[in-house]
Amino acid sequence: MGRVFAMGGGMLRAVRAMHDEELVFNNREPNMKVRTMRGIAFAVALVMVGGAAMMAQAGPMTAKEQANLTFVLDWWRDVLQARHLDLAPKYQAENYIQHNINVPTGRAGFVQFFGRTGAPVNPIPDKLANPPVVQFAKGDFVVLVWEREGKDPADPSKTYKYNTYDMLRIENGKVQEHWDYAQKAKGGPTGGAFLVAASQCSWIIPLSTRTMSNQYAG
């Protein structure tokens, strides 16, 4: 079960400011995909700053959304955790769009990149070793929020916990598109698709990040 974090006033102001700026960014009547992406972007930011309890009040997922979530979790377990890249065609579209700058876009690029991480795990585990602490689907989009642990750079003898997220879009029964937070790695391959590739409003993610960063800086 996902954790519930207290939301401080600064964080809440950041989310509100992000939402206000997003609403006035484009005053044209949004289509269904734009409305869905706006809701997802706001939901991701809300969860990442501690709004899991508020997300829980949004109502249950539809049967299709639950199926999309289960499909993505199965893909993550079979292909990423168990490293069965041979199963990628079962889950991913051939023209899969990858927005992480360090991973090639396309299913073939994905398979080539993650095929270097090790031999497949057999048998495939029944469950994810470390499931996401928050997981939900909205329309064609699935959001996973993970809890990670790393060494404290100020004191290597200590560790600290932090969160990362992945957002995926389902189309025609396959994982079509993926977003997460990533900066270009030194010496790493350059990949990723430009943010406006398949989604007509992927600008919401960097817009949200920029707004929140400005709030914290102020």
Image: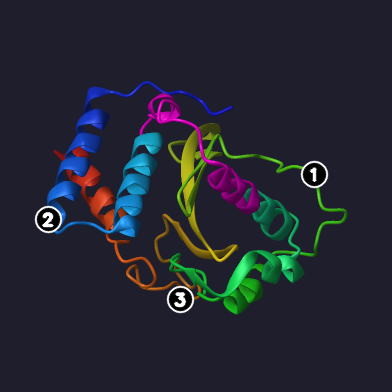
- Badge 1 vs badge 3, beta-carbon distance below 8 Å: no
Question: Percent from the top left, x then y, of residue 208?
Answer: 26, 49
Question: Percent from the top left, x then y, of residue 95?
Answer: 53, 77
Q: Residue furthest top?
A: 6
Pointer 1 residue: 126
Name the kind of residue labelled 3 in the image: Thr
Please indicate whether residue 202 sits to the left or right of residue 30 in the image: right
Question: Percent from the top left, x then y, of residue 22?
Answer: 19, 49
Distance between mark 2 and mark 3 Cα atoms: 35 Å
* First along the sequence among labels 1 and 2: 2
Can residue 50 be found in the magenta stretch? Answer: yes
Name the kind of residue labelled 2 in the image: Asn
Regarding mark 1 in the picture, which secondary structure is present there?
Answer: loop
Question: Percent from the top left, x then y, of residue 111?
Answer: 65, 73
Dominant secondary structure of the magenta stretch?
A: helix
| Quadrant showing the N terminus | top right
Region rendered in magenta? 49-72
| Quadrant showing the C terminus | top left
Regarding mark 2 in the picture, which secondary structure is present there?
Answer: loop
Classify 10 Å Cα crowding around label 2: few (below 14), some (14-19), many (20 and above): few
- Badge 1 vs badge 2, beta-carbon distance below 8 Å: no
* First along the sequence among labels 1 and 3: 1
Pointer 2 residue: 27
Can residue 52 be found in the magenta stretch? Answer: yes
Name the kind of residue labelled 1 in the image: Asp
Pointer 3 residue: 190
Q: Look at 24% across and 54% down and name the residue there.
A: 207
Q: Look at 39% across and 37% down and name the residue there.
A: 48
Distance between mark 1 and mark 3 Cα atoms: 34 Å
